[in-house]
Image (spheres, rainbow, N blue to C red):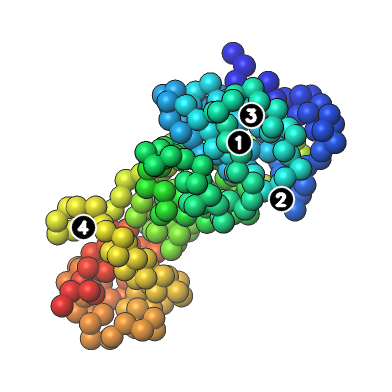
């Protein structure tokens, strides 16, 4: 079964030549040319046919073609306006079901996306071969600003995937991992080698599925309110400011009162000599609650 007619080197080259296009290195354009990978992405996404799906960096529309039969609507954000003829052909094939948003994805999420939707509409999933230079930032931004998005299936650089999926104590675990865990959990992954792209990137890639699972208040069990998420984020940023320092020293250096830090660490059952990279996301939630306790 073919998922996308563009998912081959021959078809990608033909499409680019027909429109006088080429892959732009400065925009991180590496077009996916393996239909089997498209199928694995769609399997991981588990779309039901009615969802509104957000795609970032559609390129010539290779993954877009696979999404359209499996989604109610696709909103695709593309920075390179030169790709309009290629993507416009796909929009003509699916009238009213493919919306093209032109511009920087970091500037278009959430306002540029929501502007295309009615009051009762919202994107339910992000499925994309992301531009690698903005992938980590964009994933967190989508989770923070588009609460309707319940799952993300994204192609990213393998090193970034390692950071997203890292466990406490591992070399890849850091502030980004802990902040991502306030919104979701990695529930699936597969690797994608450079030979699956045209031109081949100089790095390995991976596809991750992230399901939204908001962090919860340790006392009430309720999902953290936005202001609590911001408080936890501030603690995480301070705790990871210098990896070789203890969590107590980092928090004090970050402006927290020394006496309150000591008291809060004890209340949260965290050793003052511990280092941030050994703490689970839930530890930071407890610590932030203790620091804010009056």
How far apart are the alpha carbons under marks 1 and 2? 20 Å
Q: Residue at x 40, y 38 (%)?
A: 121
165 relative to 263 in the view: left or right: right
Q: Position of residue 8 (x, y in %)?
A: 72, 25
Q: Secondary structure at mark 1?
A: strand
> In percent of the image, x 55 and y 28: which residue is there?
96
Give the Cα distance between marks 2 and 3: 22 Å
Q: Which mark is residue 64?
A: none
Residue depth check, mark 3 versus mark 1: number of the one nearer the observer: 3
Q: CA distance from mark 4 to mark 3?
A: 44 Å
Quadrant of the rendering where the N terminus is positioned? top right
Q: Can you identify the residue that label 3 sits on?
A: 91
Rate crowding at label 4 as few (under 14), some (14 to 19) or many (20 or more) other CA atoms within 10 Å: some
- Say whether marks 4 and 3 touch (CB < 8 Å): no
- Circle 3 Cα neighbour tier, 10 Å, few/some/many (<14 / 14–19 / ≥20): many
Q: Which residue is mark 2?
A: 27
Measured in 3D between alpha carbons, the distance from the residue under mark 3 to the one under mark 1, in whole angstroms, is 28 Å
Q: Quick one: label 2 or label 3, which is nearer the N terminus? A: 2
First in residue order: circle 1 vs circle 4: 1
* Residue labelled with disc 1: 192
Residue 124 visible within the image? yes
Question: What is the quadrant of residue 272 in the picture?
Answer: bottom left
Q: Is residue 145 above or below residue 11?
A: below
Mark earlier in primary sequence (3, 1): 3
Give the x, y percent position of residue 103: 64, 50
């Amino acid at each position: 079964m073919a998922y996308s007619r563009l998912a081959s080197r021959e078809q990608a080259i033909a499409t680019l030549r027909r429109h006088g296009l080429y892959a732009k290195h400065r925009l991180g354009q590496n077009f996916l040319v393996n239909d089997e990978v498209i199928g694995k992405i769609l399997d991981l996404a588990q779309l039901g046919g009615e969802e509104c799906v957000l795609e970032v960096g559609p390129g010539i529309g290779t993954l877009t073609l696979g999404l359209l039969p499996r989604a109610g609507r696709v909103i695709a954000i593309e920075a390179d306006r030169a790709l309009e003829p290629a993507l416009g052909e796909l929009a003509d094939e699916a009238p009213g079901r493919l919306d093209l948003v032109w511009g920087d994805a970091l500037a278009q999420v959430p306002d540029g996306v929501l502007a295309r939707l009615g009051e009762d509409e919202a994107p339910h999933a992000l499925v994309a071969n992301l531009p690698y230079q903005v992938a980590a930032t964009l994933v967190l931004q989508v989770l923070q600003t588009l609460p309707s998005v319940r799952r993300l299936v994204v192609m990213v650089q393998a090193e970034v995937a390692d950071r997203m999926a890292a466990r406490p104590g591992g070399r890849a675990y850091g502030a980004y991992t802990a902040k991502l865990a306030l919104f979701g959990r990695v529930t699936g992954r597969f690797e994608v080698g450079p030979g699956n792209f045209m031109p081949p990137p100089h790095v390995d890639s991976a596809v991750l599925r992230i399901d939204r699972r908001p962090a919860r208040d340790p006392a009430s069990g309720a999902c953290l309110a936005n202001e609590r998420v911001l408080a936890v984020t501030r603690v995480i940023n301070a705790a990871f400011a210098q990896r070789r320092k203890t969590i107590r020293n980092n928090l004090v250096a970050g402006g927290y009162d020394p006496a309150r830090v000591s008291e809060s660490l004890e209340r949260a059952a965290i050793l003052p000599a511990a280092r941030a990279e050994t703490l689970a996301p839930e530890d930071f939630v407890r610590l932030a609650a203790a620091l804010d306790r009056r």
